[in-house]
Image (cartoon, rainbow, N blue to C red):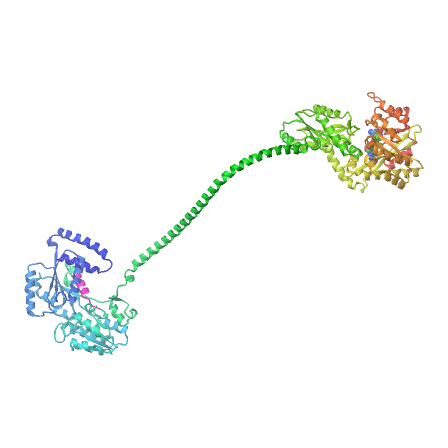
């Protein structure tokens, strides 16, 4: 039985809250543990505790106390043998009852060992004290439910201790006043039993203590019905305070709970109570004395005694209630707010609020829900993303398959097109061959053209081991053919020339027409200059016979510039440039020949460019000067006249020989300006000199072919003569033999006019050209100048004087004056004198002199002895 009790207590202890599942677990553990331990312990180990209740089972106050005791005992030690007895003193407070109780308990316990007797309320306490020696093993007694007044009866006893039953009317009244400060009346309900009277008295005292003006009305002299009947009339500023009320005025028992319920339902003011058993009936609350608390404390004391403490040594406990207990529903009914209540309070009957009860759980669950929601959110986001991607993929897939279909459709078309294209390709190749031929060939002659040279031959040149020679061929005087005979004859001549040149081509020798009268032989496999020279001679020889074009017999010569590769250039451009340069050298040297390119040519070219540049200001800066070389008349040995020879002193280039710059002046056209200046200056100087010295010296002026071919040449000469007042008979114009030969027709007329004016005409450098003297018959010249080349032969044992002799002989036959130039030695002079030369010019007499020096020479001439 005791074990069952303990289990029950645990259930009660834990309360009926949410911890039920946890409780179930604990219960299970306890259930299995307890019997096991019981088996282990021997009977003698068990302590026998008797709980003796004054009142009956079912009376709440008593039941609460018993529960309290049991809970304390079971908490402390499960090895208790607990017996519970009820004296039922409230319902049967009679001696007969006492006798019966005594007999019954004696039967039960006289022969048993009782270790502690725990009593609830006064009757059981006194009974235990009085009878313990006979039936309760003289055990120590622990009481509860006895107030200080009740305790007085035991003042002579010992071996007991307990818990004083105290009530807290003062705290309760103070709380009521705090809730409603205007309270002025307290209706006090208690019965006229011993305990009722004593509690009533305590309440009155307490009320006075709190506030002496409080009107305390004790209702103990009224029946329960009267009390209930007067309730509707009681003052609003009052409270009802119920304490011990178990007996009506007539002594009949009162069902306290039912009474409390009735009072509460009838009352318009809050009903306060001092015991916990009054609650749950509509009573508002109070600082409550609880049976359970009383029991628990008593149980604790019993534990201490069992553990060995002496009851007398344990002081009697006095409890203090620290919390104000109130009924939530009643507070609502009277509109009492929580803030009006004492701070420490216990709420009863509060309707179940899930949120409040499971606050932590709710928070946890909410947290989890939020967490889950956010997870789901993230998940949803990604699912959506994935779906979108899937959708896109599907779309792309569709597009792809469409594209695939289109592609396979076009494949067939493509095949058809491929056939068309290959047809077109064949045609194109045909055209291309044609075009290629057109592009690489000259239309007039059918020879390869410049493009072919650059593209096809140029490619071969990239190989450095490729050796050979490039021949740059320029026809001499082709311009005159074109001008004189017309372009169609010119074209036919070019075709005829091409055909002749073609005979020289072979596998390794290509012929190219660059344009105009320019041709190129590109000969590979020529490894030395000797071999290259042989081929140049072959070219020249091809032109030895005349060309018969439309009844014109034409004599053609060529100037050939040769560039060797790779040493003179590894590209067509460079080779062409260098071969061209070499060709020009031939032209300058009198044409009709060949010349190998060398680096000096390049320097010459640079010099030419420099010269050209400096011409611009030379006249203005007075850089030109004329020197005069005397000509001595054989026979008289007098000074006959002078040859004017130009000199150029330039800051940058220094003293320049006319041989160098005259040709440049001719090419640039500057010669026309310069030539006029020379003519004018020379004429002017000699005119003045003649005047000054009263002499009639002749003046010979060199005339360039370029000057001569100018339309206004005669006009210019006339003008100069007029301006300088020189007599035309004293002027002699020197024209180079080659010039006259090249342009006979052009110049003959002019020479005739000049001759008519009285001007003399000398053929310079006579004998150097290949011309025969026969053509001279048609030109009215006056003088022949034997070139220094032939004069040099005089006295030279390795050569002969045939040319000089012939010139003199022939010249005299034609009634021409013969001048020998470059005479340096006495021997030359003597020979020339003996052979009838008319005039002598040379260093033997004098170098060309500036005018001051010339005057000196003239003045000193008579004294000079030339032997
Ligand atoms: P050129 O007309 O045959 O002139 C004769 C050249 O022989 C002159 O050279 C003269 O100084 C040089 N000379 C004369 N006697 C001797 C001598 O005994 N020994 C040596 N070694 N040389 C002698 P320069 O003055 O250097 O002129 C060279 C050429 O330049 C001229 O040859 C002529 O063709 C041209 N030239 C000179 N002045 C003029 C000019 O005013 N106008 C034109 N168009 N050409 C000129
Ligand atoms: Ca001359
Ligand atoms: Ca000369």
Residue 797 shows up from this direction: yes
Where, quadrant-wise, is the C terminus in this rendering?
top right
Residue at x-position 19% and y-position 71%: 260
Residue 212 screen position, x and y as percent? 24, 78
Residue 375 screen position, x and y as percent? 36, 52
Quadrant housing residue 233: bottom left
- Residue 682 versus residue 180: which sits nearer the camera? 682
Residue 289 part of the magenta segment: yes
Where, quadrant-wise, is the N terminus in this rendering?
bottom left
Q: Is residue 313 left or right of residue 180?
A: left
Q: Which residues are magenta?
A: 288-301
Residue 792 part of the magenta segment: no
Quadrant housing residue 315: bottom left
What predominant SS class does the magenta segment belong to? helix
Residue 167 screen position, x and y as percent? 20, 70
Residue 719 screen position, x and y as percent? 88, 41
């Amino acid at each position: 039985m005791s074990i069952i009790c303990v289990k029950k207590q645990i259930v009660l202890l834990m309360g009926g809250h949410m911890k039920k599942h946890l409780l179930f677990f604990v219960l299970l553990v306890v259930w299995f543990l307890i019997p096991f331990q019981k088996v282990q312990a021997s009977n003698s180990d068990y302590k026998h505790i008797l709980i003796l209740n004054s009142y009956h089972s079912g009376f709440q106050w008593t039941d609460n106390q018993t529960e309290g005791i049991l809970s304390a005992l079971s908490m402390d030690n499960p090895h208790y043998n607990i017996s519970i007895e009820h004296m039922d003193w409230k319902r049967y407070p009679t001696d007969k009852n006492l006798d019966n109780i005594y007999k019954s308990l004696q039967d039960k316990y006289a022969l048993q060992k009782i270790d502690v007797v725990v009593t609830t309320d006064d009757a059981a306490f006194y009974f235990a004290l009085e009878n313990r020696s006979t039936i309760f093993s003289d055990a120590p007694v622990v009481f509860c439910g006895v107030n200080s007044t009740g305790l007085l009866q035991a003042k002579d006893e010992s071996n007991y201790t307990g818990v004083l039953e105290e009530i807290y009317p003062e705290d309760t009244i103070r709380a009521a006043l705090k809730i409603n400060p205007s309270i002025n009346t307290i209706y006090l309900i208690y019965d006229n039993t011993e305990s009722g009277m004593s509690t009533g008295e305590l309440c009155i005292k307490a009320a006075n203590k709190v506030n002496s003006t409080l009107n305390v009305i004790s209702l103990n002299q009224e029946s329960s019905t009267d009390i209930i009947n007067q309730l509707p009339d009681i003052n609003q500023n009052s409270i009802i305070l119920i304490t011990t009320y178990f007996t009506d005025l007539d002594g009949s028992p009162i069902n306290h709970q039912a009474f409390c319920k009735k009072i509460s339902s009838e009352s318009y003011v809050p009903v306060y109570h001092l015991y916990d058993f009054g609650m749950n009936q509509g009573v508002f609350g109070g600082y409550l004395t609880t049976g359970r608390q009383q029991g628990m404390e008593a149980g604790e004391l019993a534990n201490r005694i069992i553990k060995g403490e002496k009851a007398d040594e344990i002081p009697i406990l006095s409890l203090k209630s620290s919390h104000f207990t109130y009924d939530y529903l009643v507070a609502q009914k009277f509109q009492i707010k929580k803030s009006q209540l004492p701070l420490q309070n216990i709420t009863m009957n509060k309707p179940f609020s899930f949120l409040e009860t499971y606050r932590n759980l709710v928070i946890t669950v909410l947290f989890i829900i939020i967490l889950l929601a956010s997870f789901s959110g993230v998940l949803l986001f990604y699912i959506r993303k994935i779906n979108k991607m899937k959708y896109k993929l599907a779309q792309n897939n569709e597009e792809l398959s469409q594209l695939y279909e289109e592609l396979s459709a076009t494949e067939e078309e493509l095949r058809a097109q491929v056939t068309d294209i290959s047809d077109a390709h064949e045609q194109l190749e045909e055209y291309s061959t044609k075009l290629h031929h057109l592009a690489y060939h000259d239309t007039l002659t059918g020879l390869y053209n410049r493009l072919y040279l650059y593209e096809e031959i140029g490619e071969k040149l990239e190989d450095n081991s490729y050796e050979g020679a490039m021949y740059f061929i320029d026809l001499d005087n082709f311009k005159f053919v074109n001008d004189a005979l017309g372009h169609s004859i010119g074209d036919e001549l070019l075709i005829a020339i091409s055909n002749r040149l073609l005979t020289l081509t072979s596998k390794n020798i290509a012929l190219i027409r660059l344009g105009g009268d320019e041709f190129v032989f590109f000969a590979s496999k020529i490894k030395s200059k000797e071999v290259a020279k042989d081929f140049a001679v072959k070219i020249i020889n091809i032109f030895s016979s005349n060309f018969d074009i439309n009844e014109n017999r034409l004599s053609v010569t060529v100037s050939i510039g040769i560039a060797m590769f790779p040493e003179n250039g590894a590209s067509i451009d460079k080779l062409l440039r260098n071969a061209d340069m070499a060709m020009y050298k031939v032209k300058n040297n009198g044409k009709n020949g060949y010349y190998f390119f060398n680096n000096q040519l390049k320097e010459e070219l640079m010099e030419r460019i420099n010269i050209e540049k400096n011409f611009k200001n030379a006249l203005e800066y007075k850089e030109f000067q004329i020197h005069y070389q005397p000509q001595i008349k054989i026979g008289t040995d007098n000074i006959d006249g002078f040859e004017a020879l130009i000199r150029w002193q330039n800051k940058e280039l220094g003293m320049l020989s006319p041989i160098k710059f005259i040709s440049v002046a001719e090419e640039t056209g500057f010669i026309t300006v310069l030539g006029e200046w020379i003519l004018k200056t020379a004429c002017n100087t000699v005119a003045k000199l003649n005047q000054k010295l009263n002499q009639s010296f002749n003046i010979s002026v060199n005339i360039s072919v370029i000057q001569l071919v100018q339309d206004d040449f005669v006009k210019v000469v006339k003008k100069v003569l007029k301006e300088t007042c020189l007599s035309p008979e004293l002027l002699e114009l020197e024209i180079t033999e080659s010039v006259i030969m090249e342009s006979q027709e052009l110049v003959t007329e002019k020479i005739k006019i000049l001759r008519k004016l009285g001007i003399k005409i000398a053929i310079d450098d006579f004998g150097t050209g290949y011309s025969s003297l026969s053509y001279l018959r048609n030109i009215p010249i006056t003088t022949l100048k034997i070139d220094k080349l032939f004069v040099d032969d005089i006295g030279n044992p390795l050569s002969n004087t045939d040319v000089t002799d012939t010139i003199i002989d022939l010249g005299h036959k034609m009634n021409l004056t013969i001048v020998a130039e470059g005479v340096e030695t006495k021997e030359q002079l003597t020979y020339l004198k003996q052979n009838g030369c008319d005039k002598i010019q040379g260093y033997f007499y004098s170098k060309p002199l500036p005018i001051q020096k010339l005057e000196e020479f003239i003045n000193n001439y008579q004294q000079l002895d030339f032997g």
